Amino acid sequence: MRVGICSVGAELVSGEVADTNAAWLARRVLESGGRVVAELLVGDDRDAIAEALQWLARRADVLVVGGGLGPTADDLTRYAVADFAGVKLGRRRALVEHLEDVYSRLGLAMPPSNLCQADVPVGAQVYDPPGTAAGFALDVAAAGRDVRVHVIPGVPWEYRTMAERDVLPDLLGRSGGVARVTRTLRVVGVGESSVGEQLRELSDRLVRAAGDPEDPAHGIDLGFLAGSDEILVRVTVAGPTPAAARDRAAPVVAEIADRLGVSVVSVDEQKLEDEVARLLRAASLTVVTAEGCTAGRIAARLAGVDGATDYFRGGVVAYAPDTLPQMLALSPEVLSRHGRVSAEAAEAMATTARQLYGTDIAVAATGVEGPRRPEGDPEVGTVWWAVALPDGTVHTHERFIPGDREIVQARTAAFALGSLREHLLILGSSTLQTG
C-alpha cells in the first residue's frame, strides 16, 4: 500500500519550522504495513495544495494531509481538499457545538471566524477533534481509481493523537494485516565501519535469508545510519501485527546488543541521557559538569530529562581558554605545564568541579573544536574528557574527532556521557556483588 504525505504551512516551506510530523508519520506508516512513496511540503495556497494532492494521487493509494485546519484566513486545506474531491463544504452541527463548548469552558466568546472549523467536505467522515480542529477522511476518484484522503491538524500533539487513533488503524486494515516495525539501537563510542565489521556475520546471514522464504529470518532487514553523535543500527521486521513484528525482531536486537556490548547505550526512543538518568537515580548519585569545548552540551542533555534535579546539580562552562583558572579555580601550573587540552587538565576540571559542588560524580570535557586552533593547542578535533567517581578515582579519555565544530562538540558530549554510563554500570555491578 502506497502512502503520500502532504504537509501544509508557509512556516514549513520557508524552513522556519522543521516538518517533524511527516518524519514521525513515515515511521508509523511502515509499522502499519504501508510504504511512503512521497512527502510534499506546500505553502498556504489553495490551488497549490489541490495540485499537490493531484500529483500525490497519481502515485499513492492513501494520502495523509496535515495542517491548515485552523480558523485564520491562511488556513485553506479544507477548501483545497473539497476542490480536489469536486465537492462542496458542509457545516456540521456537532462540530459547531464542540467549538461552543470549548470556548464556554475557557470563559471566552467564540470569534465568528472559528465556525469555519465546523466545515468539512460533503460526504466526509469526521474525526473527533482533540483540540478545536476536527479531522476528516473521504474517498476521492482520482487517476482512474479511489484514493483515500485523511486530513488532520498540523499541531504536533493533535496530529499524532488523530493519526494514532484514526489514520494508522485504517492503514493497517488496508495493508492486508502486514505490519513492519523498525527497532533502533543507539551506539556511541565506535565508528560506523567498526559497527559494520562487528555485525558483518549477522548482516550476511540476513542477506542470505532474504532469498529464502523458508528461512525464519526472511524479511528481516539490517541498516545503519551515522549521526553527528551516535550510530543508529536499525532492524526492520514484518509481521501480521506491530506486536508480532516486534517479537520477531527481539532475537536480532538481542544479538546485536550482545555483539556490540556497552557501545549500545539504548534501544528505540530512549536516548543516552535517559539511560544515564536511570542509572544515577537507581544509585542515588549526583553529578556536575565542567565543560570547555562542548560549551554546555553535556549539561543540556542531562538537564533535558524529566526530573533531572534528582541527580543533576549544575554545570560550569569555561569556554574561553583564559577562564578555566577563574571559573574552576584550576591551578595555573596544570595549564602551563600540560596545556588546557590534556589528560591532566580534564582530570583537574573534573576533580575540582566535584569538590566545589559536593557531588558524587563530575564529568569534564576539554578540546579544540575549531574552526581555528588557539596557539599552543593540539590540532582541531583533539578532545579529552574525564569522569571523577565517588571513590576519588578519575578516568580520562582521549579521542581525535574529524569534522566541523558541530560534529566535534556533539560527539565529545556523547562520548563523555557514554563513559559516564559505562562507569555507572560498573558501579551498579559492584554494588550488586558486594550487597
Image (spheres, rainbow, N blue to C red):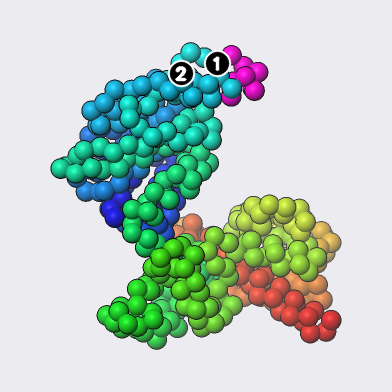
Task: Between residue 361 and residue 226, name the one nearer to us.
Answer: 226
Is residue 109 covered in magenta?
A: yes
Task: Assess disc 2: are there few (<14), some (14-19) or many (≥20) residues with their C-alpha within 10 Å of its C-alpha.
Answer: some
Quadrant assignment, res 30: bottom left
- Give above or below for 106 relative to 146: above
| Contact flag, marks 1 and 2 (Cβ < 8 Å) | yes
Q: Which residues are magenta?
A: 102-110
- Compared across the picture, whether 331 is left or right of 126 comes to right
- The amino acid pointed to by label 1 is Met
Q: Secondary structure at mark 1?
A: loop
Name the outermost residue toward the left: 144
x, y (%) of residue 208?
Answer: 31, 83
- Compared across the picture, whether 302 is left or right of 124 comes to right
Give me the disc on residue 365. none
Residue at 32% across, 26% down:
122
> In which quadrant will I find the C terminus?
bottom right
- The amino acid pointed to by label 2 is Leu
Quadrant assignment, res 288: bottom right
x, y (%) of residue 415?
Answer: 58, 69
Instruction: Kindly report the distance in space between the C-alpha atoms of the residues bearing marks 1 and 2.
Output: 9 Å
x, y (%) of residue 430?
Answer: 77, 82
Residue 147 seen? yes
> In which quadrant will I find the N terminus?
bottom left
The residue under label 1 is 110
Task: Between residue 270 and residue 111, name the one nearer to us.
Answer: 111
- Give above or below for 347 relative to 271: below
- Compared across the picture, whether 315 is left or right of 6 comes to right
The residue under label 2 is 115
Is residue 287 covered in magenta?
A: no
